[in-house]
Amino acid sequence: MSQTTRLSGLSHVNRVDDGPPLADLLDERRHLVALAHRMLGSADDAESAADECYRRWYALSDRERERIPVPLESETFLAGR
């Protein structure tokens, strides 16, 4: 069972660490995994690519992340690299 599948049962949780709503995070991750799967052709590789994308995103400083107006576009770009 994937992490996304496990977390989807937590839809009653509204926020994570004062960040965006959990449902938004799950939708974003599904989008990234789907994109990576189309690009890579493998579910396992797609999950790994999405994980790497989030590692890179959260490795940025708060100041660097604030300069990115639409994070999903940036993450989609990172997933394609």
Image (tube, rainbow, N blue to C red):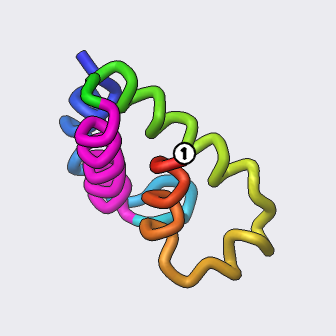
Place residue 34 in its image quadrant.
Answer: top left
State yes or no: residue 26 in magenta: yes
Q: Residue at x 68, y 78 (%)?
A: 66
Q: Which residues are magenta?
A: 21-40
Front-lying residue, 68 or 37: 37
Residue at the far top: name it: 1
How many marks are shown on the rendered structure? 1
Position of 3 relative to 39 (above/below) = above
Place residue 37 in its image quadrant.
Answer: top left
Residue 40 location in percent, x, y? 33, 32
Is 63 on the left or on the right of 43, as rendered? Answer: right
Residue 77 location in percent, x, y? 50, 60
Is 1 on the left or on the right of 45, as rendered? Answer: left
Q: Which residue does the numbered mark 1 point to in the structure image? A: 53
State yes or no: residue 24 in magenta: yes
Q: Is residue 20 visible?
A: yes
Position of 18 relative to 4 (above/below) = below
Q: Residue at x 24, y 41 (%)?
A: 38
Circle 1 packing at 10 Å, graded few (<14), some (14-19), many (20+), is many
Q: Residue at x 31, y 49 (%)?
A: 26
Magenta: main secondary structure = helix
Question: The residue tagged with tag 1: helix, strand or loop?
Answer: helix
Position of 9 relative to 54 (above/below) = above
Q: Residue at x 76, y 67 (%)?
A: 62
Q: Amino acid at mark 1?
A: Cys
Residue 1 location in percent, x, y? 23, 16
Q: Is residue 13 visible?
A: no
Front-lying residue, 21 or 45: 45
